[in-house]
Image (cartoon, rainbow, N blue to C red):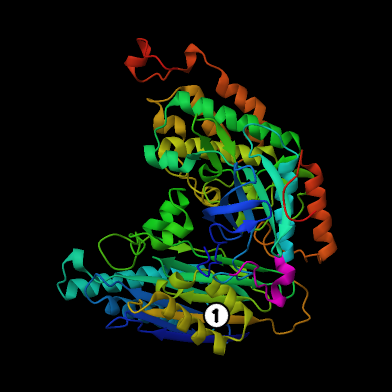
């Protein structure tokens, strides 16, 4: 969002025992690099570098933080620590794995396992939605397995979206970017809106009327599944509260996907939190159930035995 | 009411300036409006002028000295502006596909609250200033093809800034289809809050830095400095740039803090974090790692 971008560390730059190869991505708060450790193993390194609060010129290593921004810079640092703390306690194949965390260059670095693949966002874009039911069930079952573990640690992700779901080359998913994550017990005042993604953020992330909980992430999972069929994000929850124009998945794709999958997506996307599935594991079980009743009714081809369900 | 408004418009690297802007105020209400006439269409500057004129005329008629309903005023005013432009095109016998069009963003401040309405990709920024503690920046969501793609998760904001379709809008005043006009909920202003209305020529080269910089320093010097920066960043072919900024000052700095609508802003004061706190946090996280062997700090 900020165009007053910080310069990334240059390729070849040494960072402790790591050597930067190139920048992978940059957001408003951080830069992610591909690097190699001393043994030559590729890693992803996330550098805390908020654009609005610090400036690093070309060829510079440490950010230049104006004194009046130091307090805000440090506060953002605290959020970055939250992400590190959240992730270091987790060891699950569907959650990004943290390898190291250290301080250098007047900022901090989070080292993560690097895996080849692409984001679900790119996958949806490439296929213009319309991903197969078998793929969706298997992949989201993996996402929910990881999310169940996250919730089990008392943590909420709060920014699940296709861009934050990494698909390995074998199609298995990895939950990324815990920059918005918070411990459920810590949730007092509403989090800053800047951390939300319209379309994927649940209504309770806009309005403080309901408590955030696992159901908040489940709304986002439902929105991701909806996007995987539609090719685009569903209507934003704050707009839905005023004027709900979201066409239920059951109406929109009744002929192409099983009633159970579509009903599950619609249930996840309910505006009223208590009416959504309340637990990631329960939702995962629903996705894993594979019965004859799950075939789509509309296509006679499926009734005469199309394979793949 | 206590406020400061600064307005400036530049031609950039273009032959004509198709941006228009104005502000008007009574003792109880302030109107700010910005319109960006669309380049690919005939008489874009006429459409922008008609939009600003229509909105200003209606404000003059209806704000006596208060508006009965600011939200309704904004919606009506933008729709009337659309109709004026359509009527003008018809009177000049301009074919529909070439008819003059314009974006429009208009804002009313009354009773310490701001409301706004927009069509197209001219923006309103609202910076809630927490002084020592924090800043919160909001801006209107563009009615643009790239914004849709960003919302849909198809592209990131960085990609949007460079995307070949970044100038395409799906709602504007004038033209054959009814504009989509988005109306805000009223937002209570606090001492030091900043509102900026601008065309894409001003926000596009600078991003949110435009608003955060404005909130930081006195408007009289910052507005021209930021437009200079945007013009430099955009290079020789710079688009027209227009910016109106208002800083809201509460009449008495000792009034109790107004609590904003729940869910919108985090008004909590931030605790100070010392260098030792940072060291402790890093050590704590490293302690949780299965085997943190590499790295710089111990």
Q: What element carries label 1?
A: loop
Q: In this view, which residue lies farthest toward the front?
A: A39
Relative to A127, does residue B172 appear above or below in the rendering?
Answer: below
Q: Which residue is drawn at 73% across and 57% down?
A: A103
Mark 1 lies on residue: B66
User: Is any atom of residue B64 visible in this view?
Assistant: no
A93 in magenta: no
Chain bearing tag 1 is B
User: Is any atom of residue A21 visible in this view?
Assistant: yes
In x, y percent, where is residue B183? Answer: 48, 63
> Left or right: where does residue A272 sit relative to residue B55?
right
In x, y percent, where is residue B19? Answer: 36, 79
Q: Magenta residues?
A: A60-73
Q: Residues within 10 Å of mark 1 (few under 14, many from 20)?
A: some
Q: Which of A201 and B70 is in front in this view?
A: A201
Q: Which of B152 and A113 is in front in this view?
A: A113
In x, y percent, where is residue A19? Answer: 60, 53
Relative to A76, does residue A173 appear above or below in the rendering?
Answer: above
When asked about the image quadrant of residue A10, the answer is bottom right
In x, y percent, where is residue B143? Answer: 40, 60
A67 in magenta: yes
Q: Which residue is drawn at 74% across and 33% down?
A: A152
Q: Which of B35 and A125 is in front in this view?
A: A125
Q: Which residue is drawn at 72% across and 47% down?
A: B294
> Left or right: where does residue B211 sit relative to residue B44?
right
> Left or right: where does residue A258 sit relative to residue B250?
left
């Amino acid at each position: 969002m900020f165009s007053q971008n910080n310069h990334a560390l240059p390729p070849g730059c040494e960072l402790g025992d790591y050597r930067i190869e190139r920048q992978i991505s940059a957001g408003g708060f951080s830069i992610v690099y591909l690097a190699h450790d001393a043994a030559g193993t590729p890693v992803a390194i996330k550098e805390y570098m908020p654009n609005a609060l610090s400036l690093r010129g070309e060829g510079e290593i440490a950010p230049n933080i104006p004194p009046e921004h130091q307090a805000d810079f440090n506060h953002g640092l605290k959020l970055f620590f939250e992400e590190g703390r959240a992730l270091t306690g987790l060891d699950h194949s569907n959650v990004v794995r943290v390898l190291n965390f250290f301080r250098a260059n007047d900022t901090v670095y989070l080292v993560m396992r690097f895996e080849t693949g692409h984001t679900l966002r790119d996958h949806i874009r490439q296929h213009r939605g319309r991903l197969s039911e078998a793929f969706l069930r298997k992949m989201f079952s993996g996402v929910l397995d990881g999310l169940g573990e996250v919730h089990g640690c008392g943590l909420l992700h709060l920014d699940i979206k296709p861009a934050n779901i990494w698909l390995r080359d074998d199609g298995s998913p990895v939950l990324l970017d815990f920059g918005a994550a918070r411990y459920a017990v810590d949730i007092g005042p509403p989090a800053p809106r800047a951390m939300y993604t319209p379309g994927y953020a649940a209504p309770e992330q806009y309005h403080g009327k309901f408590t955030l909980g696992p159901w908040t992430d489940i709304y986002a999972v439902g929105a991701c599944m909806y996007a995987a069929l539609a090719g685009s994000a569903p209507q934003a929850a704050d707009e839905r509260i005023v004027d709900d124009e979201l066409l239920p998945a059951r109406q929109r794709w009744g002929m192409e996907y099983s009633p159970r999958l579509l009903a599950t997506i619609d249930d996840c996307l309910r505006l009223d939190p208590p009416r959504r599935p309340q637990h990631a594991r329960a939702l995962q079980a629903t996705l894993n159930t594979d019965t004859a009743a799950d075939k789509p009714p509309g296509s006679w081809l499926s009734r005469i035995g199309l394979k793949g369900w | 009411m206590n406020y400061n408004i600064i307005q400036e418009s530049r031609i950039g690297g273009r032959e004509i300036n198709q941006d228009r802007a104005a502000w008007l105020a009574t003792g109880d209400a302030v109107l700010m409006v910005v319109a960006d006439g669309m380049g690919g269409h005939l008489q874009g500057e006429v459409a922008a002028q008609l939009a600003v004129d229509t909105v200003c005329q209606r404000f003059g008629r209806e704000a006596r000295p208060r508006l009965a309903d600011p939200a309704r005023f904004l919606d009506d005013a933008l729709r009337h502006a659309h109709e004026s432009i359509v009527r003008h095109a018809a009177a000049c016998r301009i074919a529909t596909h070439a008819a003059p069009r314009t974006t429009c963003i208009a804002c009313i401040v009354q009773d310490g609250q701001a409301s706004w309405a927009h069509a197209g990709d001219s923006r309103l920024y609202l910076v809630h200033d927490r002084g020592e503690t924090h800043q919160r920046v909001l801006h209107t969501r563009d009615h643009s093809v790239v914004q849709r793609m960003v919302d849909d998760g198809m592209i990131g904001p960085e990609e949007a800034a460079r995307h070949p379709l970044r100038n395409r809008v799906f709602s504007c005043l004038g033209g054959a289809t009814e504009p989509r006009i988005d109306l805000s909920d009223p937002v209570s202003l606090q001492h030091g809050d900043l509102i900026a209305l601008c065309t894409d020529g001003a926000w596009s080269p600078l991003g949110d830095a435009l608003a955060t910089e404005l909130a930081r320093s006195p408007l009289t010097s910052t507005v021209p400095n930021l437009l200079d920066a945007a013009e430099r960043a955009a290079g020789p072919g710079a688009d027209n740039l227009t910016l109106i900024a208002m800083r809201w000052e509460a009449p008495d700095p000792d009034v109790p803090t107004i609590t904003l609508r729940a869910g919108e802003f985090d008004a909590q004061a931030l605790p100070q974090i010392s260098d030792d706190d940072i060291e402790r946090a890093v050590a704590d996280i490293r302690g949780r790692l299965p085997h943190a062997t590499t790295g710089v700090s111990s």
